Image: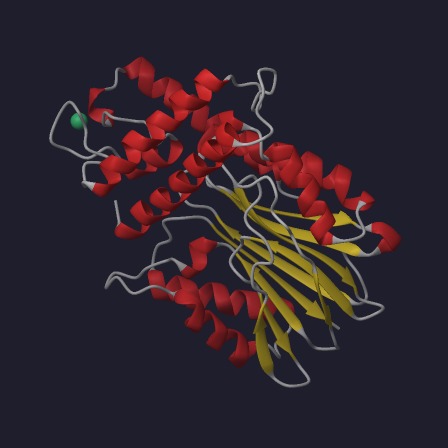
């Protein structure tokens, strides 16, 4: 397992533990209040598991197989961080069950991605998905917003496999149902957070970028809930702007204070959304593709039509890393 993956586990599990502790100590707790159907005893149990795992990450024993000297496959830790034996000790039946779960997860996930990209005389959208070997947590979607404006989302669900796919299907249903009812992305984020924050069983959270595009009025409004900052290239000035987080990831805290930002958009502007699989991809020498490389690419090629821009970026990333270990999802929105 790479340091980066360990860091990511450490960050995610620490946040998760803190959220649970906050709930345990919070005002909302009473005899009757349950966290996503869990009792106080179950919450304490999960907190204690998380504490053990964080200690093992700290002392470097996380991922050690308890049956032999090997490491547990990191893909399997991503699916279930409590895994303590490597595949070599699994029976054929257990391996088959594992494969069935993965197949189901992949099937759920394929059905979740939108069938078509919205067409409009004002905007051009291109999407590219590079799935990693194991089912990943990338998600994107389009939805209609009040007043006929276009909503779009790109998200990364922490965790993989079947639990992540189930969480994603909840997210899809929620977005499509709630998107048209909320005139501001931050209000939508608040609502999603309310829906997801108490779901203890999922041991997960969602970083998501929500945007509303009013191409006719030339306005982009967004709420970035803990997602990698998309890049907006402004044709008039030739400069880029990082759309930094305006709130934490969904499901982390009770009172998240999400904010919306509003920006004018002009003809020729380009918006690039992506997931961490792109910027965190490393080449054989250990160098990361990184945000700077991405920003340079955008500055150099933003004048291209959306499809050429996308193909070029995909090729540039591909030739840099050779092989992606995580999902990569890219979305380009060009304002005409
Ligand atoms: Zn082993």
Residue toward you, 19 or 53 = 19
Residue 320 located left or right of residue 177: left
Q: Residue at x 29, y 38 (%)?
A: 74
Q: Is residue 117 above or below residue 66?
A: below
Residue 67 in the image, given as x and y percentages of width and height:
15, 22
The image quadrant of residue 168 is: top right
Q: Going by the picture, which residue comes out furthest to the bottom? A: 237
Residue for point 85% across, 68% down = 216
Quarter placement of the N terminus: top left
Q: Position of residue 139 (x, y in %)?
A: 57, 45
Q: Is residue 205 visible?
A: yes
The answer to whether any part of residue 117 appears in the image is no
Q: How is the image coloured?
A: secondary structure
Q: Is residue 23 left or right of residue 5?
A: right
Asked which quadrant contains residue 181, the reply is: top right
Question: Which residue is drawn at the image coordinates 26% and 49% (left, top)?
Answer: 2
Query: How many numbered circles does the render carry?
Result: 0
Task: Report the residue that reaches farthest toward the left.
Answer: 69
Q: Is residue 30 above or below residue 258?
A: above
Residue 133 horizontal side relative to residue 106, left or right: left
The image shows residue 270, relative to residue 15, as above or below, that is: below
Locate residue 210, reporting x and y percent.
66, 53
| Depth order, front residue of 65/33 | 33
Q: In what quadrant of the picture does the C terminus appear?
A: bottom right
Image quarter for ligand 1 equals top left
Residue 213, x across and y down, in percent: 76, 61
């Amino acid at each position: 397992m790479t340091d980066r993956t360990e860091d990511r586990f450490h960050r995610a599990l620490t946040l998760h533990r803190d959220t649970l502790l906050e709930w345990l100590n919070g005002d909302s707790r009473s005899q009757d209040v349950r966290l996503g159907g869990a009792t106080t005893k179950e919450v304490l149990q999960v907190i204690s598991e998380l504490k053990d795992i964080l200690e093992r990450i700290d002392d470097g024993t996380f991922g050690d197989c308890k049956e032999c000297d090997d490491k547990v496959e990191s893909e399997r830790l991503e699916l279930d961080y409590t895994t303590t034996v490597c595949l070599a000790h699994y029976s054929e039946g257990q391996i088959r069950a594992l494969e069935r779960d993965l197949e189901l997860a992949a099937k759920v996930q394929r059905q979740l991605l939108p069938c078509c990209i919205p067409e409009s005389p004002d905007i051009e959208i291109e999407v590219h998905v590079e799935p990693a070997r194991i089912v990943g947590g990338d998600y994107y979607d389009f939805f209609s917003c009040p007043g006929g404006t276009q909503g779009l989302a790109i998200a990364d669900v922490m965790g993989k496999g079947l639990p992540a796919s189930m969480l994603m299907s909840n997210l899809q249903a929620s977005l499509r149902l709630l998107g048209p009812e909320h005139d501001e992305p931050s209000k939508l984020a608040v609502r999603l957070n309310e829906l997801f924050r108490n779901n203890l069983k999922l041991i997960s959270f969602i970083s998501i970028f929500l945007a509303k595009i009013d191409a006719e009025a030339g306005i982009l409004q967004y709420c970035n809930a803990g997602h990698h900052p998309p890049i907006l290239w402004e044709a008039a000035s030739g400069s880029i702007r990082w759309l930094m987080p305006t709130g934490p990831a969904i499901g982390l805290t009770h009172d998240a204070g999400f904010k919306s930002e509003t920006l004018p958009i002009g003809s020729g502007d380009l918006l690039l959304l992506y997931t961490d699989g792109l910027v965190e991809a490393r080449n054989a020498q250990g160098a990361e593709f990184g945000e700077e490389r991405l920003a340079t690419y955008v500055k150099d090629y933003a004048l291209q039509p959306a499809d050429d821009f996308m193909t070029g970026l995909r090729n540039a990333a591909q030739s840099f890393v050779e092989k992606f270990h995580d999902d990569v999802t890219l979305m380009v929105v060009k304002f005409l």
